[in-house]
Image (cartoon, grey):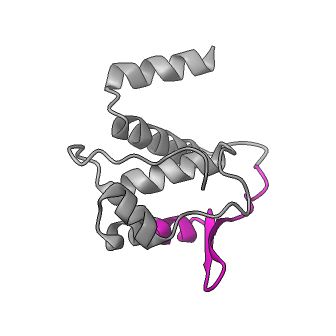
Amino acid sequence: MTGPAVRVDTTSPVPPYEQIRAQLAALITAGRLTEGERLPTVRQLSADLGLAPGTVARAYRELETAELIRTRRGAGTRVAPLPPRPTRSSPAQLATLARDFTTAARALGADTEAILAAVRKALD
């Protein structure tokens, strides 16, 4: 992963594993992390972020459950191919995207007004 960095705000009420999961999910679904791109090992990312390896491992497990990444012994953890986009979005999909975005934005220190302003600007 040579691109965007993941950041964790330890003062946030959002658990660190969820901040990691949401930021990586957003980077993958936005195409900033591409299919086949290698992610840091659990040990490396936990050292980089100053967190326990179990915290990063939980985020990776949840991303694997969502089929956004794949981990194979000897090949490491890589971004999985994205499933084909549905022709219509469901309320559940939109809620997941909104949750991922707001979690990532809060991890960056954005307040509610800044998040709403960013969404409004993106819609224009």
Q: Looking at the image, is 60 positioned above or below residue 95? A: below
Return the residue nearer the eye: 66 or 38.
Answer: 38
Expressed as whole percent of the image width and height from the top left, the position of residue 86 reads 76, 49
Q: Looking at the image, is 80 positioned above or below residue 106? A: below
Task: Reply yes or no: does residue 67 show up in magenta.
Answer: yes
Expressed as whole percent of the image width and height from the top left, the position of residue 51 reads 29, 62
61 to the left or right of 12: right
Quadrant of the image for the C terminus?
top right
45 to the left or right of 54: right
Magenta segment range? Answer: 60-85
Residue 66 position by quadrant: bottom right
Q: Residue at x 60, y 46 (%)?
A: 3
6 to the left or right of 15: right
Number of marks drawn: 0
Expressed as whole percent of the image width and height from the top left, the position of residue 48 reads 39, 58
Residue 121 position by quadrant: top right
Return the residue nearer the eye: 13 or 34.
Answer: 34
Return the residue nearer the eye: 38 or 24.
Answer: 38
Q: Name the residue furthest bottom.
A: 73
Q: Residue at x 54, y 43 (%)?
A: 97
